[in-house]
Image: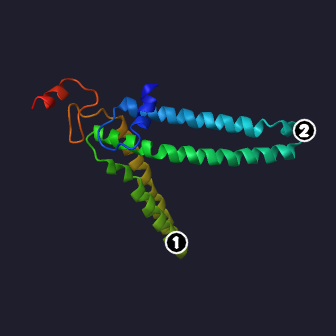
């Protein structure tokens, strides 16, 4: 449980390294939080007492609770954005990669949008096809990031800091 909250304790710390355990347990904690929020929304939205008596009132209640849920969702998402970004950067640092790798899926996505706009304005199906192919770059970049997240960290200290697993490699750095 401690691993799930460690990135929140290191809220905006982009330097250093994070172990796989810290990264993946945090991801699990965020996923469990979203599932809990979803369950609450379903219970509040679809379980209103008025839904049994009057289906129309039940729909109004459902949409009202959906609006409240979206506000709560937005607040939680904004609160978790920085620690999620920071733990991802530190995880890349642990594999001796720059945090700028997080931008890898964004470049093909933006290029896809530009090509799609050009395709729509010129009504070119060839450009639309190119946009779809370029969009595959977003998927490939996401898979590359997933692989980086799963790789073990570099043993011993690297340019981003000491090994978070500790061990003799850190002792060697201390005595040099």
From the image, state whether disc 2 or disc 1 is nearer to you.
2
Q: Residue at x 63, y 48 (%)?
A: 71
Q: Does 114 sit above or below residue 173?
A: below
Residue 138 visible to an observer of this rendering: yes
Q: Earlier in the sequence, mark 2 or mark 1?
A: 2
Q: Position of residue 161 (x, y in %)?
A: 24, 38
Quadrant into which the C terminus falls: top left
Q: From the viewer's perspective, tell me whether residue 149 is left or right of residue 32.
A: left
* Disc 2 target residue: 53
Q: Residue at x 50, y 32 (%)?
A: 29
For the question of whether residue 104 can be seen, the reply is no
Rendering coords of residue 140 (x, y %): 40, 49
Distance between the alpha carbons at the discs numbered 2 and 1: 53 Å
Residue at (37%, 49%) from the top-left corner? 102
Question: In which quadrant of the rendered view does residue 144 lie?
Answer: top left
Disc 2 crowd, CA 10 A, few/some/many (<14, 14-19, 20+): few
Q: Is residue 168 left or right of residue 76?
A: left
Q: How many marks?
A: 2
Q: Which residue is mark 1?
A: 124
Q: Residue furthest bottom?
A: 122
Q: Quadrant of residue 37?
A: top right
Give the secondary structure at mark 1.
loop
How far across and how far down the image is residue 12, in percent?
39, 44
The foreground one among 105 and 90 is 90
Q: Residue furthest right?
A: 53
Q: Nearer the viewer, residue 20 or 127?
A: 20
Q: Is residue 16 above or below residue 99?
A: above
Residue occupying the point 52% across, 48% down: 78
């Amino acid at each position: 449980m401690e691993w799930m909250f460690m990135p929140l304790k290191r809220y905006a710390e982009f330097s250093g390294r994070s172990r796989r355990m810290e990264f993946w347990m945090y991801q699990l904690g965020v996923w469990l939080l979203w599932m809990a929020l979803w369950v609450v929304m379903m219970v509040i939205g679809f379980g209103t007492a008025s839904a049994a008596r009057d289906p129309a009132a039940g729909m109004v209640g459902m949409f009202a609770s959906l609006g409240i849920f979206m506000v709560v969702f937005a607040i939680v998402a904004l609160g978790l954005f920085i620690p999620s970004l920071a733990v991802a950067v530190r995880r890349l640092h642990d594999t001796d990669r720059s945090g700028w790798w997080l931008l890898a899926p964004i470049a093909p996505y933006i290029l896809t949008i530009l090509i799609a706009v050009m395709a729509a304005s010129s009504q070119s199906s060839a450009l639309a096809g190119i946009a779809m192919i370029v969009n595959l770059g977003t998927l490939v970049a996401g898979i590359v990031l997933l692989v980086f997240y799963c790789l073990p960290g570099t043993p011993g200290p690297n340019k981003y800091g000491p090994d978070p697993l500790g061990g003799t490699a850190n002792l060697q750095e201390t005595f040099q």
